[in-house]
């Protein structure tokens, strides 16, 4: 598996977390990377994505202004900074990438080909 998400844990409402998606075998600079989440008994939903060369970043409406996606080229990772967390953010978070380089990212899981193991984020007091 070329991707591994990590950084999830229990956090209180209003708190913050920084998730990381570590890539192996390819350079994240040239590929679309998406962050998705899946809560119990719910479908997987797109949270944020970043296009190659940082041409574009996109966010699901409920996380706009709270989450920020970015690349760390030295570490070959994509991070998701999550601030002002609310209980509704509780889910398993996954990162993913498309098989083809370049192009534009999307928040639809069906556009992505490779998935890392998820990391659990729990927002609760």
Image: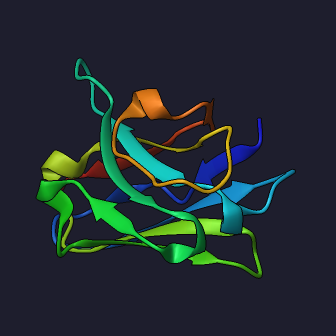
Residue at image x 23%, y 17%?
41
Does the rendering let one see residue 86?
A: no
Residue lying furthest bottom: 74
Answer left or right for 91 relative to 53.
left
Viewer-nearest residue: 39 or 27: 27
Q: Can you say whether 98 is above or below 121 in the image?
A: above
Residue lying furthest front: 103
Answer left or right for 17 relative to 32.
left
Asked which quadrant contains residue 113, the reply is top right
Viewer-nearest residue: 94 or 17: 94
Q: How many marks?
A: 0
Answer left or right for 57 relative to 124.
right
Residue lying furthest top: 41
Residue at image x 69%, y 46%?
3
Residue at image x 18%, y 73%?
84
The image shows residue 92 at horizontal and vertical percentages of 40, 38
Q: Can you say whether 92 is above or below 106 in the image?
A: above
The image shows residue 52 at horizontal and vertical percentages of 58, 65
């Amino acid at each position: 598996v070329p991707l591994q998400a990590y950084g999830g844990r229990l956090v209180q409402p209003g708190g913050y977390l920084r998730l990381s998606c570590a890539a192996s075998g390819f350079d994240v600079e040239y590929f679309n990377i998406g962050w998705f989440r899946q809560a119990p008994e719910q479908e997987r939903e797109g949270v944020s994505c970043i296009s190659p060369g940082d041409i574009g970043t996109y966010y699901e409406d409920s996380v706009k202004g709270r989450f920020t996606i970015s690349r760390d080229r030295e570490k070959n990772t994509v991070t998701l900074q999550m601030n002002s967390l609310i209980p509704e953010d509780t889910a398993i978070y996954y990162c993913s990438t498309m098989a083809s380089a370049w192009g534009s990212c999307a928040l639809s899981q069906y556009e992505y080909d490779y998935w890392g193991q998820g990391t659990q984020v729990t927002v609760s007091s």
